[in-house]
Image (spheres, helix red, strand yellow):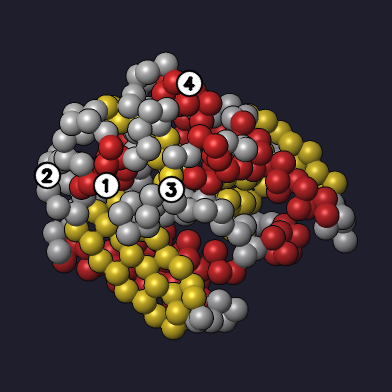
Amino acid sequence: MSTHITIATRESRLALWQAHHVKQLLEAQGHTVSLLGMTTMGDQILDQPLSKVGGKGLFIKELEVALAEGSAHIAVHSLKDVPMDLPKGFSLACILEREDPRDAWVSPHFDSLENLPQGAVVGTSSLRRTVLLHALRPDLKIEALRGNLDTRLRKLDEGQYAGIVLATAGLKRLGLSDRIKHSFDLRKMLPAAGQGAIGIEICADRPDLLEVLAPLNHLHTAVAVYAERGVSRTMGGSCSMPLAAHAKLNNGILSISAAWGDPLNSHAPLIQAEDQCALDPQSANALALATQLGVKVAEKLMAKGAVGV
């Protein structure tokens, strides 16, 4: 049965691309869809790191208000911006197939991180990227880089940084693949939990929307992301956590790797852990099993000295 659906979305170019992508998928299912563009607190506060002003939940609060008030039916998010625990009354309805989850090296003059001169300035406001970059190059000077994708690229082009690290997925989605010098090997730069995936949030009392969105859910991505978010949730994860986690389902085996670094000591080695389990993504308990695997890996990290919050 067709229905009309209003999508709440941030108004950044990448957020609108994601919302239009979901719109097209729903229209292909026979639904009519409109967009409700909104500016969030996370979009407005650009002079401080997210870890100091409330975390990535600042990117979705206004969208949740629109859902609660009924002015929108669903909200489309970059999943890595979604807090590990949603407020009461909201739920994650589905997860779309993931784009390339890797981080991208972007620089006008240097082909790789290895080619940077000693003490070069690299831009990122992510604590995860900061500790991973320092693990590869302790000499680098990491400076804050906030703003939407276009703003970050403009700051790079103005010469404020020798290079910056961005999500490969966002650059690809906006047709900016030519800005990528290379995407980091996952063994060197593990992504954030949920990186490259799009999540759709609804009010928890709308089972009718669950049915509408079911065809968009990608099971392989969902179990991987639930495992990753299991790591972050167990460690109290947010953007104030220098934590990376990446999982993948291959031939019925869900494997996950995670890393934690000390943001106060650029010379400290990363703490790393991994695990795997057999998993059928279509089983009724698949998401619970994936989450449990993430919990196990988080416990391994903490047993080795990683500090939760």
Q: CA distance from mark 1 to mark 3?
A: 14 Å
Q: Which mark is residue 267?
A: 2
What amino acid is found at the position of numbered circle 3 in the picture? Ser
Q: Earlier in the sequence, mark 1 or mark 4?
A: 1
Q: Residue at x 62, y 31 (%)?
A: 13
Q: What residue do we see at 60% from left, 78% from top?
A: 282
Residue type of the residue flagged with mark 1: Leu
Question: Element under label 4?
Answer: helix
Q: CA distance from mark 4 to mark 2?
A: 31 Å
**Residue to which mark 3 is pinned:** 183
Between the residue at mark 4 and the residue at mark 3, the CA separation in whole angstroms equals: 20 Å
- Give the percent coordinates (x, y) of residue 243: 30, 51
Q: Earlier in the sequence, mark 1 or mark 3?
A: 1
| Labelled pair 2, 3 in contact (Cβ < 8 Å) | no
Q: Quick one: 12 or 36, which is closer to the camera?
A: 12
* Percent of width and height locating residue 91: 57, 55
Q: Using the rendered view, name the quadrant where residue 9 is placed.
A: top right
Q: Which numbered disc, 1 or 3, marks the residue closer to the eye? A: 3
In this image, 48 relative to 302: left or right?
right
Name the side, left or right, on which 197 lies relative to 189: right
- C-alpha distance separating marks 2 and 1: 11 Å
